[in-house]
Amino acid sequence: MGTTSFVTKAVFGNAASLMIATRPSGYHSKPHTHDCEQLNWLQTGQVWVFVENRAFRLEAGDFLRIPAGVVHWAWNKSERPCTMVEVHAPGLQRDRTLAAHAVGLFDDGERPQPTAEPTTTFVDFDAEAVEKLTEPAP
């Protein structure tokens, strides 16, 4: 997803996936899209989330919605890790960035029937221009 690693736990059902990601200081994901809505809740720490040409500084307890198909990425510019809870609907359980460690929450004998199978697509986007919005004014 970016220039540093992070710890994540992910679960899914048929219509949504939930991910809890602890991102270290300096974590910087690459601009990407996916054909699912994303709801974020920052549980601890702080992080910048960029949604196309907008920058949002999230503090613990803040929520942010990212519409489906919109370019976005995150940067933990703080000196401490942060933990983000992300819900994707439809779920990203088949996405190559999550599939290896996502766990389905199904009863014994229940066959998963995902409503859709969106995936993450990394895109060429001028992130640096948008990230300048986080710099203090001269």
Image: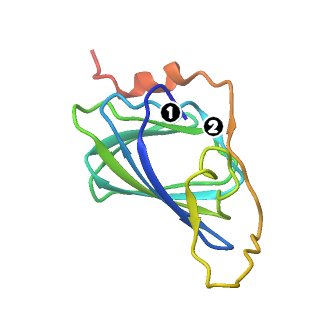
Report x, y in % for residue 22.
Answer: 36, 47
- Residue 29 disc label: 1
Local SS, label 2:
strand
* Residue extending farthest left: 79
- In the rendered image, which quarter is residue 104 located in? bottom right
Report x, y in % for residue 62.
Answer: 33, 57
Residue at 68% over, 24% down: 124
Local SS, label 1:
loop
Three-letter code, disc 1: Ser
45 to 133, vertically: above or below: below
Residue at 50% over, 19% down: 128
Which is nearer the eye, 77 or 116? 116
Left or right: residue 43 versus residue 52 is left
- Residue 121 disc label: none
Identify residue for label 2: 32
Residue at 22% over, 37% down: 80
Residue at 29% over, 21% down: 137
